[in-house]
Image (cartoon, rainbow, N blue to C red):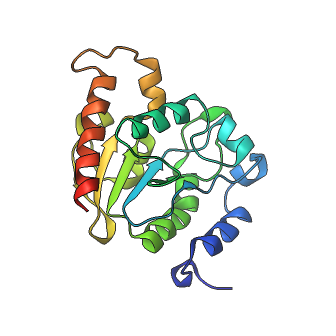
């Protein structure tokens, strides 16, 4: 059996992930939620963990938060079908959508690392608090670091953004509101994307 470091394509990683039994979430999952969107070397979004709908369908971001995420991308002419590769820090749903445990994140990390290593995305969007703590070593919360660029793996640029479920709970569009800030962030992301 090959080690993950030697695997060179996403389908081999997906196959390995689909049969994973490294943590207790394997027993409670309906489906492994590996990825969606367009595998490419320009733009990757890393979310937190699958929710109920994602677990049912085996696809990340398919509930109301996913629909909002698609609208956010569409507002600047991007789509998951053509431009964005979407994955999560965890590939299996934690019970009751609780935060992932450190050992669960550690068990899944090799799959996420392989996705990043194979695609070598130039832009990585870190979507939400859980993804932030998985990808960037900072004592600051998502509200303090969203919209800022960080150095990522393979020379990539990483930007933390609000999770769309947070935006659904904060409906205001006034200047300084989470939705207004997300609009600023997605325009900055598109500007950098277009310059690639």
Q: Position of residue 151 (x, y in %)?
A: 24, 60
Q: Is residue 174 above or below residue 102?
A: above
Whether residue 146 is visible: no
* Rendered position, 5 above or below 100: below
Instruction: Report the quarter where the C terminus lies.
Output: bottom left
Q: Is residue 25 above or below residue 117?
A: above
Q: Quadrant of residue 116?
A: bottom left
Whether residue 92 is visible, yes or no, is: yes
> Where residue 62 appears, x then y in whole percent?
61, 38
What is the number of callouts on the image? 0
Q: Name which residue lies at 40% across and 67% down.
A: 41
Left or right: where 118 falls relative to 103: left
Residue plotted at (50% across, 66% down): 115
- Say which residue appears at 27% left-offset and 43% top-offset: 139
Q: Position of residue 66 (x, y in %)?
A: 54, 36
Vertical side of 188 occupied by 174: above or below: above
User: Where on the picture, by quarter, is residue 142?
Assistant: top left
């Amino acid at each position: 059996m090959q080690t993950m470091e030697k695997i060179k394509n996403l389908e081999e990683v997906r196959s390995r992930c689909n049969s994973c039994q490294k943590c207790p979430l394997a027993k409670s999952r309906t489906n492994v939620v590996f990825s969606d969107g367009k595998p490419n070397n320009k733009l990757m979004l890393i979310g937190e963990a699958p929710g109920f709908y994602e677990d049912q369908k085996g696809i990340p971001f398919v509930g109301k938060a996913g629909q909002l995420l698609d609208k956010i991308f569409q507002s600047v002419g991007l789509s998951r079908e053509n431009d964005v590769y979407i994955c999560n820090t965890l590939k299996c749903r934690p019970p009751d959508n609780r935060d992932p445990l450190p050992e669960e994140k550690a068990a899944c990390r090799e799959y996420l690392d392989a996705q990043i290593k194979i695609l070598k995305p130039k832009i990585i969007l870190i979507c939400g608090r859980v993804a932030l703590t998985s990808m960037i070593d900072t004592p600051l919360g998502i509200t303090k670091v969203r919209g800022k660029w960080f150095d990522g793996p393979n020379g990539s640029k990483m930007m933390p953004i609000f999770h769309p479920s947070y935006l659904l709970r904060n409906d205001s569009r006034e200047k300084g509101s989470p939705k207004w800030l997300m609009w600023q962030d997605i325009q900055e992301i598109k500007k950098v994307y277009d310059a690639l």
